[in-house]
Image (spheres, rainbow, N blue to C red):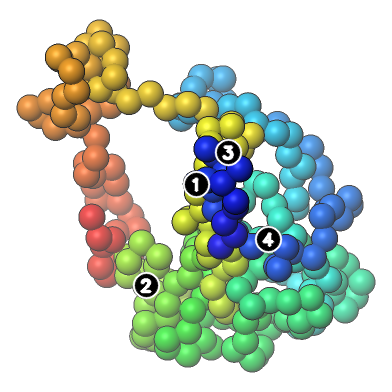
Amino acid sequence: MKKYNPTSSARRQMETAEYKSVLTVAEPLKSLTRGRKRDVGRNSFGRITTRHKGGGEKRLWREIDFLYDKHDIPAEVLSVEYDPNRTSFIALLAYGDGEKRYTLAPQGLRVGSKIITSEHAPVEVGNRLPLKNIPVGTFVYNIELAGGRGAQLVRSAGSYATVLAQEREYTHLALPSKEVRIISNFSWASVGALSNEEHGVMTYGKAGRMRHMGVRPTVRGTAMNPVDHPHGGGEGRTLTGRRRGPATPWGKPARGVKTRKKRKKSDKYILSKRKK
């Protein structure tokens, strides 16, 4: 982590990841970028469904390869780059046939590293192969829920899943949430843990940095009036919540309430639920 000299009240608290020691270029490859209108918390009708999102700097969208459909073609890492649209770093790959693609960069990947997507690839950082060929105890990321569907699980900074067991046509995985799930061992996964593992412990120092990232202010419910929030009102500072527990601004229970649907079809694939 990089700590700053206390030249102001914001700098006194500020800590960021050591980007300069990891990233190699400042500008992305133009042919793999495009403009994109962000949803900023709104649904298809334009109504706000997630509060406290909006504003921020303009972003170029990097086309990330989550399908990994170039099998048995070795690739070389040309650069490791920052992506404002996700928490982990990304790597620019040059395949043996001349094509270039972006992919999520794992920890330990460097410029010049060679990786490959193959059923018989060696179990090395960055390589991608079916779960049935990955030994127990290996860290994996970019995991498919079904073969050919593309990477869907474990895609955020510093995260990884652990291969716990191989049983018939299924692989047991311990996910970052501590949930133990079984997935078809014909699904593919990449070996390693994702980069930028310090993302979750950074101190941003001031509200202005969060505004640049598209995060709008959040007001505590206890600071409001009763007409505006169930937590509002009272003399002086009061506790969060009511007799029935913490609630959303619309009176629905919050914190610790189960949101997963009962009798969901995928329940049969969960061996151990995530810890509360």
Q: Residue at x 53, y 88 (%)?
A: 133
In the rendered image, which quarter contains the N terminus? bottom right
Q: Disc 4 to disc 2, how far (Cα)?
A: 29 Å
Which label lies toward us, 2 or 3? Answer: 3
Quadrant of the rendered image containing residue 66: bottom right
Of residues 221 and 21, which is closer to you in this image?
21
**Considering the numbered disc 3 on the image, is that residue within a helix, a strand or a loop?**
loop
Q: Nearer the viewer, residue 40 or 188?
A: 40
Q: CA distance from mark 1 to mark 4?
A: 18 Å
Q: Earlier in the sequence, mark 4 or mark 2?
A: 4
Residue at the left extreme, as displayed: 243
How many C-alpha atoms fall within 10 Å of the one at disc 2: few (<14), some, or many (≥20)?
many
In this rendering, does residue 83 appear at all? yes
Instruction: Kindly identify which residue carries mark 3.
Output: 8
Residue 149 in sight: no
Expressed as whole percent of the image width and height from the top left, the position of residue 213 reads: 61, 37
- The residue that label 1 is drawn on is 13
Sequence-first disc among 1 and 4: 1
Q: Are marks 1 and 3 in contact (CB under 8 Å)?
A: no
Residue 19: image tag: 4
Mark 4: secondary structure:
loop
Say what amino acid the circle numbered 4 marks. Answer: Tyr
Label 4: how many residues lie within 10 Å, few (<14), some (14-19) or many (20+)? some
The amino acid at mark 3 is Ser
Marks 1,4: beta carbons within 8 A = no
- Report the residue at 37% width, 82% height from top: 164
Left or right position of 30 against 247: right
Instruction: Place residue 256 in its image quadrant.
Output: top left
Residue at the spot of label 2: 174
Between residue 148 and residue 242, name the one nearer to us.
Answer: 242
Q: How many marks?
A: 4
> On screen, 262 above or below 19?
above
